[in-house]
Amino acid sequence: MSTLSWIVLASFVGGVLSLLFAAVLALNMRTAWVSKLVSFAIGALLGAAFLSTLPEAFELSEEPAQVTLLVLIGILLFFILEKLVLWRHCHFEDCEAHDPTAAVTTAAIGHGPNQTHDHDHGRSGMMIVIGDTFHNFVDGILIAAAFMVDVQLGIITSIAIIAHEIPQEAGDFIILLNSGYTRGKAFLLNLLSSFATLVGGVLAYFMLDALDFLVLPLLSLASASMIYVALSDLIPGLHKRPEIGATIQQVSLILLGIGVIWFIGLFADGH
């Protein structure tokens, strides 16, 4: 199977499966499922960053400090993008897009998808579509960069991206519904947005084939993206449940996410 085929498969299947799973969660208001997926996603993102993409970037670089500098720049870049409402789709202070569990909970406790008394005539929904399209396009580029280094790295990166896309898409889906969109239109808009991953992956493949010097910066950017999303956007939501039982469950699922990434790495290496 060619590298381009892997990129197309991971981008397309990952985007569609993430959206379908997220839609099922959102429409059935499975708040507990979303919360568990967030914890697992944190582990998968951190595992992929620290066990796969960063080690690979260090191997490609003659100067380790260059990689760490690129990661720091990447984290700052994602912070700025988030502030500019391009990375996480928000344009108001208390934004549910930062906490997918909160979005589902809000809909489940009285602001359901069929109630439009609190919507904003689609403005926040349109911001979500624009932000999600950009986000998915960048994800496609990161997936392509990983596959062009190694198929194993590409698979691990794709799993980590898909793991965090599911709870995020579920939260976005609910916000679209609460913004006044019908279920059908919300699903269609998210579906069209998900194809940006495929577009980003294919374009990156042909660009990086000629500009292979960009692979190292993109691997560093992928690491920065995973670390930033896990630590800045996902972990703060877990602190809303400080009780011991919830904490044990969260830590266990985070370790499970890390373990899955570690196991895939071992299996792919033939150990």
Image (tube, rainbow, N blue to C red):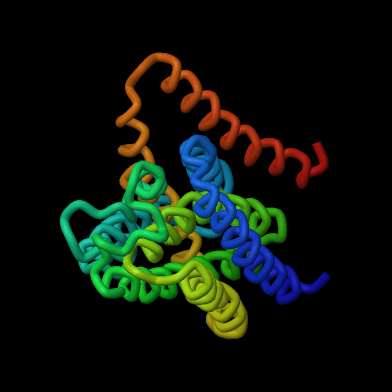
Q: Position of residue 44 (x, y in %)?
A: 55, 42
* Quadrant containing the C terminus in the rendered view: top right
Residue 243, placed above or below residue 226? above
What residue is rendered at 82% in x and 42% in y? 270
What residue is rendered at 25% in x and 54% in y? 95
Q: Position of residue 4 (x, y in %)?
A: 71, 76
Viewed as shown, does residue 137 lie left or right of 122? right
Residue furthest out toward the left? 93
Q: Position of residue 247 (x, y in %)?
A: 42, 21
Viewed as shown, does residue 91 lie left or right of 42? left
Q: Position of residue 215 (x, y in %)?
A: 53, 69
Residue 203, placed above or below residue 243? below
Residue 146 or residue 231, whichever sits in front:
231
Residue 77 or residue 193, whichever sits in front:
193
Viewed as shown, does residue 25 lie left or right of 35? right
- Residue 117 shows up from this direction: yes
- Residue 212 shows up from this direction: no
Residue 245 or residue 184, whichever sits in front:
184
The image quadrant of residue 180 is bottom left
What residue is rendered at 68% in x and 56% in y? 155
Residue furthest out toward the top? 244
Residue 229, placed above or below residue 245? below
Residue 79, placed above or below residue 135? above
The image quadrant of residue 178 is bottom left
